Amino acid sequence: MTALAKAMPQLVTAEPLMRFDSLSKRYGPVVALDDVSAHVYPGEVLGIVGESGSGKSTLLRMMNLQESPDAGTYALDLPDLPPNLFDLDRFERRMLCARRIGIVYQNPHQGLLMKNSSSGNVAERLLIAGERRFHVLREKARGALDASEFPLDRMDAPPVELSGGMQQRVQLAKAIALEPALLLLDEPTTGLDVSVQALVLDTLKRLQQDRRMTMVLVSHDLGVIRTMADRVMVMRQGKVVEEGLADQVFQDPQHAYTQQLVHAKL
Amino acid sequence: MTLASLTRPWRAFSYGFLDASAKREMRRKMIKAVAVPGCQMPYASREVPIARGWGTGGLQVTLTLVNPKSVVKVIDQGADDSVNAASIRRFLTRVSGAGATNDTLAASLIQSRHRIPEEKLRADQILILQVPNPEPLRPVEPNMSAARQMHADADYGRLWLTLYEQIVRSGRVMQGASYPSMVNGRHVMSPSPIPRWDVPKLHMADHLTILSAGREKRIFAVPPHTRVEPLVFDDVPYRVEDHAGLTCARSGLTGYFMNEIPQDGGGSAHEVSDSELGVKAIRRAEGEDPEIGATWYVDGEMQR
Amino acid sequence: MTPLLTVDDLSKTFRMHHLGQALPAFERLSFTLSAGEFLLLSGPNGAGKSTLLRTLYRSYLPTGGRLIYQSEQGPIDLATAADVDIAHLRRAEIGFVTQFLTARPRVAAEEIVAEPLRLAGTPRETALDAARHWLATFGVKPDLWRAYPTTFSGGEQQKVNLARALIRPRRLLLLDEPTASLDAGARAALVRRLAELKDEGVAMIGVFHHPGDVAALIDREIPLKTKEMADVAE
């Protein structure tokens, strides 16, 4: 046994698609993020769980380049990008997010033009990316809505006339319309009733499996995280308290806070 | 010492109603606007003796450009004789000593709001359009700071989205007037409430067009020989109003933009919108020989 | 020949922060497992048999020791390997067969079974054909293939689980009472399948409620004993 080297080499079976290093952010005296590092690998779902004020939403906003940290770097393993995405200017950030990063917000008002048609909401994404053919916009919007399991006979109804679950499907269709490298989900099913929530999660899961889509899912709902995530990051007061494979974090939580969280739920 | 020795007889403080510094600002902003075609330049917008929203923007430009040798034409809804057009024209001639005309060919400055004359404008003519809402993005982005950012980014996807919605709802583009148009491939402008019929007249035109919004304090320009391309989808061509086949009930002209006149019987008659062109046609029919210039449209087809 | 899995001084203690207590599951365990070997874990309830399997699968984090696994890309310590490597090994090399259905609700049985193949990039139809083959092998009636397994009986769910766990070739199988609630036919099919896999060189380590079912396959046995809970300082 002693013949075996003390430190085993890692296999490195994948290069991370996304890499965050030592992010810190303060709002006045409030520490939102304290030296947070994270990797996301291609095709996996990273779940970020934590109570309100844990910093999980701040982290997600940074992934979507809506906010910059006080310190730290953010890299995406995609062609033609700088080593630190926070070096991009406002316009470059906007274009990168529009083309390569999809996001679904908890509140549909944040992600949708409520009075435009649902298909128009999806088309907007394609328009930002420069598509100028009406029939292509139409077909791609239809395809994305269909993949989000949205009823196509309502594709031209404005979101304001749709139920919460349907609005989330429109957001999802908009987010995946350009086949982003990374899909960010910010409490996507919070605020939906339980049966609708389950159906939306089914759709997400199916999409994830069919397209091997890389996702980051932020939720305070452990059930949602457990259904969706491959790996879990537990955050508290701006710090990562625990990180691991989803089944390990839920079955064998190491940190006192995680144990409390898991036991409070189950 | 008498009071008379300290004063002098009244004379105008400055020529053409506006004071010299106001005109200097207008000139500078016009030059800027010409330098960056289609880009809205802010300006101070002085008070002029008509109400905001009635053409104050256009009037300030005309007052700045006018000189005693100018010949001004003012049209409102295509007509030279409406109250607003007539009073603006009278005001202009009174403060500047410039000549006035109804004839498009004779005018050096043409102030208009809703129409561009059907007769082709020349390089020595300037078209001044009064613009009520200069911001094409206002319907899609009420926050003007955000809209300005969108102009800076040439981020006009939302305008195409508006067209998308119109096609989805109505099967065609419903935008009738103020059709958003890309100027010089960079800035989208709202070309004042001219009909779709008139937008192609701005494209690679010989004349200079200055568009000015007095209430909104924005001035922009389409210099001569500048591209003006209405926003369209690649697979949905731009369509002007379907007036090619209509005939003017008074002048007999065909193939120009028409006004629809409701009739007692419930039907409608049509009348050529450019009233001076109609007048010329009637005079010709009565045996006179007024000069009628080349028109942009011939038999309802835009000539390039 | 290097064993496929070398368990070296492995310990697992559950630390329960809210009770201020530690529960040792097993301590300083060492054994090896080679390709084609079948290892039986034995011991009373609470002796840590399932815990050991889950520790090998990294559902539980070991407290001490090493788990040297000879993966196709080289040796790796499962105790300290990066999550991403563990996730990769779970997809490609290490299978876990449990009696509990872990499938998502509202997904058809055949889709659940086909999933490991689809994750490996097999086309949907090919994967579904294989899924149907294995469902049939374990005696799941065709009219259930399109149904949701959450509505199945315990035995049927178990068969779906087995089909899913065995559909993709593995190098190491962890078996947590796979025969528990199976009928005789399915149990025989499973044992036949395990025997085939053993012949193909798959290493297996498992807990069986009735070890007699697999008596012919067992190469060695590791007995585990019950441990006491201990108070610890936070």
Image (tube, helix red, strand yellow):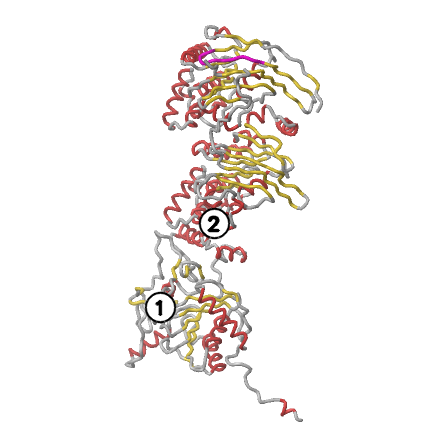
The magenta segment: C29-37
Discs 1 and 2 carry the same chain letter: no
Q: CA distance from mark 1 to mark 2?
A: 36 Å
Q: Quadrant of the N terminus of chain A?
A: top right
Is residue C32 found inside the magenta-colored segment of the image?
Answer: yes
What's the chain of the residue with tag 2?
Answer: A
Assess disc 1: are there few (<14), some (14-19) or many (≥20) residues with their C-alpha within 10 Å of its C-alpha: some
Q: Nearer the viewer, residue A121 or B128?
A: B128
Assess disc 2: are there few (<14), some (14-19) or many (≥20) residues with their C-alpha within 10 Å of its C-alpha: some
1 or 2: mark nearer the eye: 2
Q: Quadrant of residue A59?
A: top right
Numbered disc 2: secondary structure: loop
Relative to A34, is B213 above or below? below
Three-letter amino acid code at the position of disc 1: His
Q: Is residue C181 visible?
A: no
Q: Nearer the viewer, residue A152 or B215?
A: B215
Q: Quadrant of the C terminus of chain A?
A: top right
Residue B46 spot, x, y in % from top left: 55, 72
Residue B212 spot, x, y in % from top left: 48, 68
Relative to B258, is A115 above or below? above
Residue B178 is left or right of residue B280, and the answer is right
Q: Where residue A116 is drawn, which disc sits there?
A: 2
Q: Which residue is mark 1?
A: B270
Q: Is residue B279 visible?
A: yes
Relative to A148, is B61 above or below? below
Three-letter amino acid code at the position of disc 2: Asn
Residue lying farthest bottom?
B1
